[in-house]
Amino acid sequence: RELEVLVQDVVRTSSWWERHGVDCAILALSLLALPAGFLCLRWENALVFASGITILGVCHYTLTVKGSHLATHGALTESKRWSKIWLLFFVEVCTAFTAEHATHGHIKMHHAYTNVVGLGDSSTWRLPCLNRYVYMFLAPFLLPIATPLVAVERLRKVELGTALRTLALISLGLYSHYWLLLNVSGFKNPSSALGCMFLTRSLLAHPYLHVNIFQHIGLPMFSRDNKPRRIHMMSLGVLNLARLPVLDWAFGHSIISCHVEHHLFPRLSDNMCLKVKPVVSQFLREKQLPYNEDSYLARFQLFLRRYEEFMVQAPPITELVGLQ
């Protein structure tokens, strides 16, 4: 409660630009950069072509990861109507996933039960059948293909009208990408266009998969019936990665360097998570609570060394006597 008051004081004194404008501008720039990316692919020069792939790949992940994440939390706008519109656009059109399952899995499970075994323990990212090298180096390439397939499979659990809307929006997003490659970038056959789609949609797939496991798995896990207070859950079970410019831009501060702040205050935008970071870190340290931080490379090396323990074996449950 004391921390909430401190953070709300920062939010109240922040301008609209700080609360929403910075992140909306990054997403708008990503949309505006797309034509340049598609046009670069018309060139036979390898450097220009590679620049087009890079532009489209980074823009894709900015829209699908940063955009979808902020839209899922309603952090892009204070309007409920526009929040719904942005949710459908970023999650279904751009990401090719279902808005309902994104909200349920991320908000109602992962955030409500962070690191609670069987609920919000990030177990959906575990694939025990794969060895460490296949998982860490090859499995990320499956994400562009698996995402729409998983979305279609989960449509069985929603109402018919919702399923039809989701199918229409996912199809719109995928076909638009394909059409632009044929008609703007000048690809001559479907297979080359589909190959380019796969390449741009997998450009940052490796860090995306890695980040999702680095920031929770390997940290204390709790049982549903004996979990600690929320502030202890978040300080113990969440980790911030060191800032990385490309990932800060494409994934957002709340996923990279301000993940602890995001889990404590999930409706804050990326820019606001960065702004309240000094307040949160100072508070947790003054209260002698953990404030987990590590580098991407250090976590990568740790997961390669302890892959069996973290990603194959059942996680041990942490009991915090006196903190429940």
Image (cartoon, rainbow, N blue to C red):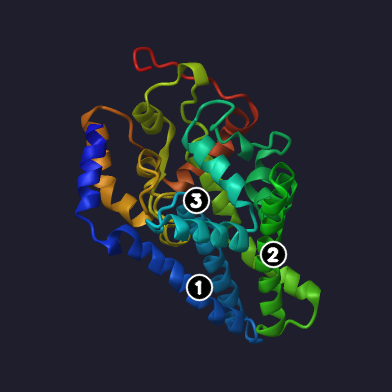
Task: Say if residue 251 shows up in the picture.
Answer: no
- Do residues under tags 3 and 2 come within 8 Å of each other at their CB atoms? no
In the figure, residue 293 lies in which quadrant? top left
Q: Amino acid at mark 1?
A: Leu
Secondary structure category for the residue under label 3: helix
- Residue at (54% x, 53% y) in the render: 207
Percent coordinates x, y for residue 180 in the rendering:
66, 78
Q: Amino acid at mark 3?
A: Thr
Q: Relative to 138, does residue 246 appear above or below in the rendering?
A: below
Horizontal side, residue 173 vs residue 265: left or right:
right
Task: Depth check: give the residue in front, 226 or 296.
Answer: 226
Could one spot residue 21 in this view of the protein? yes
For label 3, count other residues whose C-alpha is less than 10 Å away and answer few (under 14), some (14-19) or many (20+): many
Residue 109 appears left or right of 241? right
N-terminal of the pair, mark 2 or mark 1, is 1
Q: Nearer the viewer, residue 148 or 292?
A: 148
Kind of residue sitting beneath label 2: Phe
Q: Nearer the viewer, mark 2 or mark 1?
A: 1
Counting residues from the N terminus, which is met first, the one under dot 3 or under dot 1?
1
* Residue picked out by circle 3: 72
Q: Residue at x 70, y 55 (%)?
A: 148
* Up-down relation of residue 275 to residue 239 (above or below): below
Considering depth in this image, is 299 or 173 the residue closer to the camera?
173
User: Is mark 2 in CB contact (under 8 Å) with mark 1?
Assistant: no
Q: Which mark is residue 167?
A: none
What is the CA distance from the residue labelled 3 to the residue labelled 2?
A: 25 Å
Rendering coords of residue 240 (x, y %):
39, 43
Instruction: State which quarter of the image contains the C terminus.
Output: top left
Which residue is pictured at 44% across the width and 73% down the height? 29
Pointer 1: what residue?
A: 31
- Indicate left or right for 101 with 219 as reference: right
